Structures are given as C-alpha cells and as structure tokens.
Image (cartoon, rainbow, N blue to C red):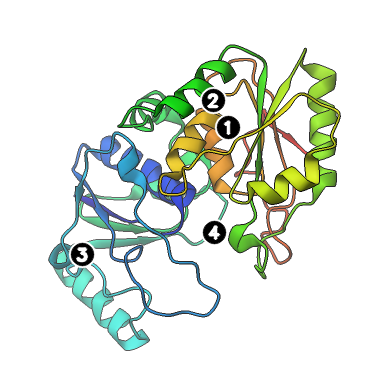
Amino acid sequence: MIIVAIYGGLGNQMFQYATAKAVAERLGVELKLDLSLVNDRTPSPGFTFRNFELNAFNINESIAHSCEVRKFVPNLWNAGNIQKKLYKIWRLLNNIFFYYEKNKFQYEERIEDIQDNTYVFGYFQTELYFMKNRLNLLNIFELKDELNIESKAIDTLIQSINSVSVHIRRGDYVDSIYHSLYDSSYYQKAIEMIKIKIENPVFYFFSDDILWVKSQFKNLDIKKVFVELDNAQNPAVDLILMSHCKHNICANSSYSWWAAWLNINPEKMVIAPKKWFKSGPFAYNTYDLIPTEWLQI
C-alpha cells in the first residue's frame, strides 16, 4: 500500500495524487489518501486553509484511516523532533517507509526506488513523475458531475472557437511573501504573442477576483470574455473549462498549470511565467516544472 499526504489547493492536490498514483500503479499496490493535513485547522500565521477538492474528479481511492497513517508517521506539521526520530526507528523495525521530497520543483530519480508500504509526502510539481500515466490521468481528472446549464453553454462555445484561457491568480497571492503577483504587463505581452500566432483568438479570463480583472483589462482591444460563474465551492469546474480552451496563458499557479496540462489540443500554445516565486532558490527554478514545449516569459 502507498499512502500519500494530500494538502494545499486543488492544483497541489492533483500533483500529489498524480505522482502517488503513478508509483502505486508501477508497484501494482493499493493507493490511499491521507487527508489529515488538508483537514488540519490548527491556527498558523499567513496560512490559507484548504479543503479536499479531488472528489470533484473520478477519484476512486479510499481515504486512509488515522490509525493507518499513524503506523507510518506522526502528525507531520505538529510533531516534535524527538517524536519524528522515534517514528524513524519504528519504521526501520517494522519494514515500512517514509518518502519525503527533498528537492522541490525538481524530479528526483530516487522515487523509482519506492517500495510497497511507503508513506509519500511532498509537492511533486513536475510532469516527469507521472507523464507515462498521462492517458489514465486525463480520464481520472474529468468532472464526476455534469456541468450546470451556464457552465455547459460556455464549455460548448470555447470548444468551437480559438479560445484562450487567461488565468489571473490573486486571493492569497496579494499579501503573500512567497508568490509573485503578476501585473497586467505580463498578460499583455502573452496576449500579443498569442495574437501573432493564433487566428481570431477569443480570450477567456478566469480569476478568483474577476471584478479586479475586469477593471484592469476591460479596455484591452481584443475579443474577450470575463467568466463570472459561481464556482467558488467547486474550483474544479473553472479548471476544466480552462483546459477545454484551445490555448492557455498561465499564472504562476499549479491551478492553471493543470488546466494547460490537461488541454489535449495537439497544437496548443501555452505561455507561463519564468519566475514562479518572489525570491529565493525557487524563484526561477522551473526547468522541471514547466514542460519544454510551453513558452516562458
């Protein structure tokens, strides 16, 4: 059995699931999801609480019981060093394992050495972990429920024209000390690149702050639609609508990364920012994160 820690927003949860799913299928063992971290509501300064959101898709895996999880690890966010060391000894004595991602945004070859009975923890933000499993993931990451009438109308239209999703992430990025908040200049440059290559593009703007986006981009001389659907409780809907667009302009967000990755248009044009974080060692470290065929600016 493989147990994977699920935490963060929808995009992060998709990376964690996709990686662990690939590992479990390679080993031919059961995969279970540990939701204890995403469900943890322990107060933490600057931390954004999330909900389990993968259940919007065709996810059939079971949720790991807390008793199963505690055979492998303590509460990883609240355990002290002594408790973690005791668990390490426990795992050695009982032939069970803990895989912890060491190099964020970089593919780690040692994941190929994972054995059965392993608890997996990390972000795993590169397609190199699950690219061989792409066809299976395309089926899994489909909406479990039908779109409502309004969403279905937009979906039908974006699949019939040269639609381009434009994802603008604000929300917790506005006050974040880690994530860059891209202004209109990045998007305007990306839009111009699309206009040069794509005939009659129509730009569909998606955001968690669509009113701000409308105020910033309303005067752009392009064919545009500001998508204002009530999908706050189900962010997977907007993600799938973006993936059905012919082309994609991404934010520095795993959410729009997945929308572009799930886009099956063989001639898609995807633009993503080079800089993923404000500063630090990961700011420009996207050579494994961004697929080689995508454009970066």
What label sits on residue 103 in the rendered view? 4
Q: How far from the left and from the top, in percent, is residue 190?
A: 79, 34
Q: Nearer the viewer, mark 4 or mark 1?
A: 1
Residue type beneath disc 2: Asn
What label sits on residue 107 in the rendered view? none
Mark 4 and mark 2 residues within 8 Å of each other at the beta carbon: no
- Going from N to C along the chain, the mark reached first, 3 or 1, is 3
- Going from N to C along the chain, the mark reached first, 4 or 3, is 3
Question: At 69% from the left edge and 59% from the top edge, which residue is drawn?
Answer: 277
Q: How many marks?
A: 4
What label sits on residue 260 in the rendered view? 1
Is residue 126 or residue 167 the one in the foreground? 167
Question: At 48% from the left edge and 32% from the top edge, which residue is drawn?
Answer: 240
Residue type beneath disc 4: Asn
Residue type beneath disc 1: Ala
Q: Secondary structure at mark 4?
A: loop
Measure the alpha-carbon separation of dots 3 and 1: 33 Å
Q: Secondary structure at mark 3?
A: helix
Measure the alpha-carbon separation of dots 4 and 3: 24 Å
Q: Nearer the viewer, mark 4 or mark 3?
A: 3
What label sits on residue 263 in the rendered view? 2
Q: How far from the left and from the top, in percent, is residue 286?
A: 66, 48
286 w.r.t. 173: above or below: above
Answer with the quarter of the image where residue 121 lies.
Answer: bottom left
Residue type beneath disc 3: Val
Residue at which label 3 appears: 69
Measure the alpha-carbon separation of dots 1 and 2: 5 Å
Q: Nearer the viewer, mark 4 or mark 2?
A: 2
Q: Secondary structure at mark 2?
A: loop
Is residue 130 or residue 47 the one in the foreground? 47
Mark 4 and mark 1 residues within 8 Å of each other at the beta carbon: no
Mark 1 and mark 2 residues within 8 Å of each other at the beta carbon: yes
